[in-house]
Image (tube, helix red, strand yellow):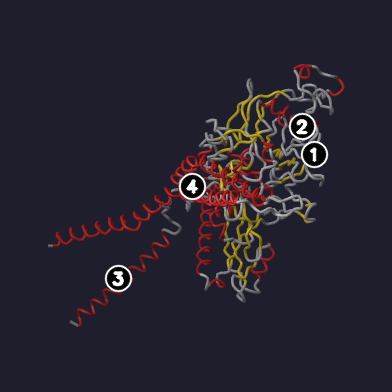
């Protein structure tokens, strides 16, 4: 018996030794091997990342600083640090020798800590009284004059963007110089001074992020020539730019320069002009002669209302959120072209008071829609927005046309100059402010002829009929992270801008990686049910709301009756009865309104209950039955 027990013990020891040795061998032989079972391969290095690593213009040295010793009690940070290191190793393997990774644990008061501080990495206290932790990355080339590019600290809230952030760092480190973007804007996207609050405004985060990848050069409003060394022209809300600037845009685009232009029938961010004076009541922007020459139709007086894409907004305390037909959330269903590299994997973008574009009749250019409305949309007059207090006012008389309206489009092909008479003079026939006629297109004057004028050329540009899409409120929130302000996106608005700029400037690898960042999967069944329910009860709700307003007016009239001296009059018995009837009617209408709101959610609640029953009862029951059947089959075979 003792010998048998001894052999049994030795067998367990031998088995444990075999498992340990095999684990070590497997860890060495199959280091870095992973099986990614996620639907979108979130944990596999994308082709874009592999291209970035393999096609670096010069070798890059990576220094990954992680305070391993100081995070021994923080398991979550250690796991995240391991994930970052393994991903960096994947980049190194894919680089064909272009990358060299060095992992450093910067202990306190060490040379490594001094090196981390020299690169500009951030030291963060993860807990009160604890040791500081370094968790960042520096990328350095052999070019001595070029400073190291860094990720100061890997924020856990950006874990889903980890691959993109590393790839972007590699691109920035290896580029001799960033592509140059010329920015021409009548909006204070770079901050400026708020005359109302007497404080400086923060720059738009979308522009700040663009400056991380490109050399953004602010162009003056009166620019008369756009240099050819500008890789891309970005025009935002061209409202009051002079005709000479429009001519410069015309010549730049015809000369092969690429451009991205944002127009708007109602720019909500246009609260103050670039000169610091209050903006005019007209918040629209338009460049009609240029659009006409490019073969594009655009109405600066109308915006698109869309009942299906409308977001719900809060109106006042105690009142349920309502649909705002002017604030729209575009999903993958809004992509006019599903496989376009700019938008193919952008999940949702929020637009506000957006206009619409169309191909002009007889255009010689190609008009390719990128983003569009649903068929539950119609154009609305933009001046309705100036006095809008309640978003439900937009639903009055709203009748979808069944047509899809284009919010963004790519325009390419051959176009002629918008200024055949040469450099325009304010008030002349070719001025934007002059009357547009057949005669003005044909007559030429020698006074403003440009001998080097480009009459015709191939153009390549993207036009978006909304500027608010880039404003912070529609896509990003600012959160505090260990005492620092961190931007956390909740929509892909900025990615739309950066993708388009990457594409127009000739880079596509970062687009693919950036698009892998967010994978929100909306419950489309619930969205469809909610839309159908709201459509069914919309008329009833509007009718009840009108009745409620009329009843409240009658109550105010009866309760406020006064004589010539201002004294409150005593109501007659009939008036008192009428007052009581109006009060009861008001309560009854409010009750019906609550029932309508409850009915809107009834079907969704029923669906949620059925799903809970399936998840809590049906699925476990099926698994239990399967386990019992398998056990019975095994027992029968054993017998």
Task: Of the two numbered discs 1 and 2 on the same chain, state the one appearing first in sequence.
Answer: 1
Q: Is mark 2 on a helix, strand or loop?
A: helix
Task: Of the two numbered discs 4 and 3 on the same chain, state the one appearing first in sequence.
Answer: 3
Q: Which residue matches tag 3?
A: 15
Task: Of the two numbered discs 1 and 3 on the same chain, state the one appearing first in sequence.
Answer: 3
Q: How far apart are marks 4 and 3 (CA)?
A: 69 Å
Q: Which residue matches tag 1?
A: 221
Q: Distance between the residues labelled 1 and 2?
A: 10 Å
Say which mark, if any, is on residue 596: 4
Q: What element carries label 4?
A: helix
**Horizontal relation, residue 11 to residue 476: left or right:** left
Q: How far apart are marks 2 and 4 (CA)?
A: 53 Å
> Considering only vertical position in the picture, is 252 above or below 449?
below
Q: Assess disc 1: are there few (<14), some (14-19) or many (≥20) residues with their C-alpha within 10 Å of its C-alpha.
A: some
Q: Assess disc 2: are there few (<14), some (14-19) or many (≥20) residues with their C-alpha within 10 Å of its C-alpha.
A: many
> Considering only vertical position in the picture, is 156 above or below 211?
below
Residue 2 visible in the snapshot = yes
Nearest the eye: 236 or 514:
236
């Amino acid at each position: 018996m003792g010998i048998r027990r001894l052999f049994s013990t030795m067998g367990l020891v031998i088995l444990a030794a075999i498992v340990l040795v095999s684990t070590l061998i497997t860890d060495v032989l199959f280091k870095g091997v992973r099986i990614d079972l996620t639907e979108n391969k979130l944990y596999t290095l994308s082709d874009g990342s592999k291209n970035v690593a393999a096609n670096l213009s010069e070798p890059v040295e990576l220094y990954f600083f992680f305070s391993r010793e100081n995070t021994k009690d923080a398991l979550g940070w250690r796991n995240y640090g391991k994930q970052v290191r393994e991903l960096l190793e994947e980049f190194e393997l894919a680089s064909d020798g272009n990358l060299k990774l060095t992992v450093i644990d910067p202990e306190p008061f060490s040379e490594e800590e001094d090196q981390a501080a020299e690169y500009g990495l951030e030291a963060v206290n993860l807990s009160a009284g604890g040791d500081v932790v370094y968790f960042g990355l520096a990328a350095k080339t052999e070019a001595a004059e070029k400073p190291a590019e860094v990720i100061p600290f890997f924020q856990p809230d950006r874990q889903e963007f980890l691959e993109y952030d590393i790839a972007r760092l590699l691109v920035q480190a290896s580029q001799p110089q960033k592509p140059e973007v010329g920015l021409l804007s009548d909006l204070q996207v770079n901050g400026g001074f708020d005359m109302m609050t007497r404080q400086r405004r923060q720059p738009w985060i979308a522009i700040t992020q663009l400056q991380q990848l490109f050399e953004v050069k602010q162009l003056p409003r009166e620019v008369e020539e756009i240099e050819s060394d500008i890789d891309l022209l970005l025009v935002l809300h061209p409202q009051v730019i002079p005709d000479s600037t429009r001519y410069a845009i015309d010549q730049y685009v015809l000369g092969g320069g690429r451009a991205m232009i944002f127009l708007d029938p109602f720019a909500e961010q246009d609260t103050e002009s670039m000169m610091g004076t209050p903006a005019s009541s007209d918040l629209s922007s338009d460049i009609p002669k240029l659009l006409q020459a490019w073969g594009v139709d655009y109405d600066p007086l109308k915006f698109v209302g869309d009942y299906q894409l409308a977001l719900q907004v809060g109106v006042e305390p105690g009142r349920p959120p309502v649909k705002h037909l002017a604030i729209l959330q575009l999903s993958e269903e809004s992509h006019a072209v599903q496989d376009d590299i700019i938008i193919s994997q952008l999940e949702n973008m929020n637009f506000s008071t957006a206009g619409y574009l169309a191909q002009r009749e007889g255009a010689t250019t190609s008009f390719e829609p990128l983003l569009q409305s649903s068929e539950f949309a119609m154009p609305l007059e933009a001046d309705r927005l100036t006095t809008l207090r309640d978003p439900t006012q937009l639903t009055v008389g709203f009748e979808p046309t069944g047509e899809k309206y284009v919010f963004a489009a790519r325009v390419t092909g051959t176009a002629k100059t918008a200024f055949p008479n040469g450099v325009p003079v304010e008030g002349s026939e070719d001025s934007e402010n002059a009357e547009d006629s057949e005669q003005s297109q044909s007559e030429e004057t020698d006074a403003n002829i440009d001998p080097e004028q480009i009459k015709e050329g191939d153009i390549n540009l993207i036009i978006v009929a909304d500027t608010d899409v880039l404003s912070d409120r529609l896509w990003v929130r600012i959160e505090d992270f260990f005492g620092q302000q961190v931007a956390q996106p909740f929509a892909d608005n900025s990615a739309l801008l950066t993708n388009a700029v990457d594409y127009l400037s000739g880079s596509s690898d970062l687009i693919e990686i950036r698009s892998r960042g967010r994978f929100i999967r909306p419950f489309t069944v619930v969205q469809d049910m909610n839309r159908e329910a709201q459509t069914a009860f919309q008329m009833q709700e509007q009718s009840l709301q009108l009745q409620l307003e009329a009843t409240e007016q009658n109550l105010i009239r009866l309760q406020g009756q006064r004589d010539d001296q201002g004294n409150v009059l005593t109501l007659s018995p009939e008036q008192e009865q009428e007052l009581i009837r109006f009060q009861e009617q008001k309560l009854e209408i409010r009750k019906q309104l609550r029932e309508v709101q409850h009915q809107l959610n009834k079907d969704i609640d029923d669906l949620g209950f059925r799903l809970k029953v399936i998840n809590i009862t049906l699925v476990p029951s099926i698994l239990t039955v399967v386990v019992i059947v398998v056990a019975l089959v095994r027992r029968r075979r054993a017998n």
